[in-house]
Image (spheres, grey):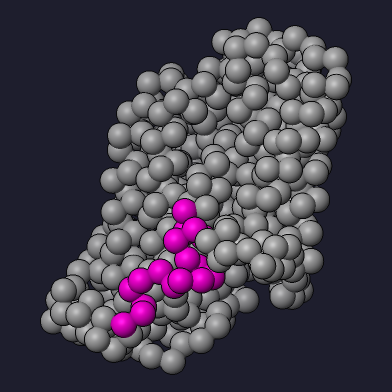
């Protein structure tokens, strides 16, 4: 066994041991509330770990450096949207938590059912959630395969890594639920911080004489690389993409569900001050991509996501490669576990709605769903083909369509009806499908318009149609009083 493979194996074993520790407090007969939201007892640090664990995934680990390598300046939108979303969380998340805690809901779809008094709306949200989450889970599994295969120098194939990682994830999700994910997220954050910051500082110095000289060389050799282009990913694309992504940031069902784990609303206000600091880590991810641009040239297409691993392998000893791979491994396991838990909880609450004395039964049912859902994800991972890439592009726009109805649910008086919310979401999702699958964009719809307009993210068109439809239909339907606010 090579040293890099040994480090990968030890990290996976440690993640499983943490899940056993979490299982001791969760218990094999725990209720669904204990299993999925930790009995709503998490403090600032555990909630911080969970939210960071869901946000910083394999896409961030590999894709952030890959975007810096392949696209340059447009990659900085990733830093922009996270920082703005954390500011928004100061007001948004306490409001969601207050209502969800009063209503004792455990999933995003259940929140919408309770907020509008409409099971039909809740079921629609569940369909949207699962449709968006499954390709996102597939992304984590594929990223896991790439990371382990590259960092083990091919000793473990990508497919074998996916099987092993998925099996481990299922085990610790079934054993300990959200508590195990939170503990593993703490390990992940420590390793990511160590590896990414270390590489982001050392690589520019080692390969280019420092961060400043690295950017000076890029500016000399690739003068357009560090500025936004005048068309395509232009400033209007950048601003609209940041804003659209901010609105969908907390709409992912597993992120939304993590809000329910907090013990009080002040947790989110403290996190709103802490989380923007985490965005600084992304700067070092970008530094790695920029360093690789000049040292590992020639990566094209999907291979740009290999920039971080390739430059690490070419520059450092195997034990460092193993540490980096282990950090990447955890960026797949933590979000993957939370996604599986979110889908299982959503389905369990729909199939077995809460009844007196049946909490443990629904928890058992949710646990049984986890390996089944993992099996479906594995099927699409190995057999889904390139269409999953298209579905993944749709996923963020899909969950963003839930934001207008969420915002309306937080108003002190009822302004939007359940029929209006349902119709708006359906129209928005239809527009998302048309723009993504049909290749429709602002430039194809309005070919004669200025690039400052046509470069705006097409997801805005779907969101505007959603809001207009929701308001019009609500005005034509009979508004019903919303449930008592917390």
The answer to whether residue 6 is left or right of residue 441 is: left
Q: Quadrant of residue 162?
A: bottom right
At x 29% / y 70%, what residue is drawn? 287
Q: Is residue 290 magenta?
A: no
Where is residue 456? Give x, y as percent: 57, 58
Location of residue 256 (image quadrant): top right
Q: Residue furthest left?
A: 209
Q: 315 above or below 447?
A: below
Which residue in the rendered view is the most extreme toward the bottom? 298
Q: Which quarter of the rendering shows the N terminus?
A: bottom left
Question: Could you tell whether 167 is left or right of 182 in the image?
Answer: right
Magenta extent: 223-239
Judge from the rendering whether residue 20 lies leftward or rightward of residue 466; answer left or right: left
Residue 229 covered by magenta stretch: yes
Could you tell me if residue 326 is visible in this image?
Answer: no
Q: Nearer the viewer, residue 476 or 107?
A: 476
The quarter of the picture where residue 6 lies is bottom left
Name the side, left or right, on which 10 lies relative to 294. Answer: right
| Quarter of the image that includes the C terminus | top right
The overriding secondary structure of the stretch rendered in magenta is loop
Whether residue 194 is visible:
yes
- Residue found 43% across the figure and 85% down from its top: 153
Front position in the image: 243 or 146: 243
- In the rendering, at what x and y percent does residue 253 appear? 63, 41
Q: Residue at x 63, y 44 (%)?
A: 400
């Amino acid at each position: 066994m090579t040293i890099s493979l040994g480090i990968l194996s030890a990290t996976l074993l440690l993640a499983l041991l943490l899940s056993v520790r979490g299982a001791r407090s969760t218990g094999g007969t725990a209720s669904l509330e204990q299993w999925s939201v930790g009995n709503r007892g998490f403090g600032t640090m555990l909630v911080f770990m969970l939210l960071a664990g869901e946000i910083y995934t394999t896409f961030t680990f590999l894709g952030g450096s890959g975007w810096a390598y392949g696209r340059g300046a447009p990659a900085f939108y990733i830093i922009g949207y996270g920082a703005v979303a954390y500011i928004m969380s100061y007001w948004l998340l306490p409001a969601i938590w207050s209502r969800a805690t009063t209503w004792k809901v455990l999933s995003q779809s259940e929140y919408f059912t309770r907020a509008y008094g409409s099971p039909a709306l809740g079921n629609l949200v569940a369909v949207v959630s699962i449709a968006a989450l499954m390709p996102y889970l597939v992304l984590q599994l594929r990223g896991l395969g790439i990371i382990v295969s590259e960092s083990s120098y091919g000793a473990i194939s990508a497919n074998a890594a996916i099987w092993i990682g998925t099996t481990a994830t299922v085990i610790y999700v079934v054993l300990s639920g959200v508590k195990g994910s939170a503990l593993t997220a703490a390990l992940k954050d420590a390793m990511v911080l160590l590896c990414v910051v270390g590489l982001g500082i050392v690589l520019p110095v080692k390969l280019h004489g420092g961060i400043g000289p690295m950017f000076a060389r890029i500016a000399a050799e690739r003068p357009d690389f560090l500025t936004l282009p005048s068309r395509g990913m232009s400033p209007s694309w950048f601003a609209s993409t940041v804003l659209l992504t901010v609105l969908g940031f907390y709409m992912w069902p597993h992120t939304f569900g993590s809000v329910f784990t907090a013990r009080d609303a002040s947790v989110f206000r403290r996190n709103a001050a802490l989380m923007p600091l985490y965005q600084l880590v992304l700067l070092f991810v970008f530094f790695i991509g920029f360093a690789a641009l000049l040292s590992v040239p020639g990566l094209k297409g999907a291979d740009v996501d290999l920039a971080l691993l390739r430059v690490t392998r070419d520059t450092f000893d195997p034990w460092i490669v193993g540490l980096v791979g282990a950090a990447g491994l955890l960026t797949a396991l933590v979000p993957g576990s939370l996604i599986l838990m979110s889908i299982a909880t959503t389905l369990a609450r729909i199939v077995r709605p809460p009844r007196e004395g049946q909490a443990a039964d629904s928890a058992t049912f949710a646990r049984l769903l986890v390996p089944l859902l993992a099996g479906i994800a594995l099927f699409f991972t190995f057999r889904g083909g390139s269409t999953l890439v298209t579905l993944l592009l749709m996923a963020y726009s899909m969950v963003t369509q839930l934001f207008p109805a969420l915002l309306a649910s937080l108003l002190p008086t009822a302004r939007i009806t359940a029929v209006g919310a349902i119709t708006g979401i359906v129209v928005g999702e239809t527009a998302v499908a048309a723009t993504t699958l049909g290749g429709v964009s602002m430039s194809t719809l309005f070919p004669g318009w200025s690039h400052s307009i046509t470069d705006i993210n097409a997801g805005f068109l779907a969101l505007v149609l959603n809001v207009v439809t929701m308001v019009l239909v609500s005005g034509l339907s009979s508004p019903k009083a919303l449930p008592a606010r917390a």
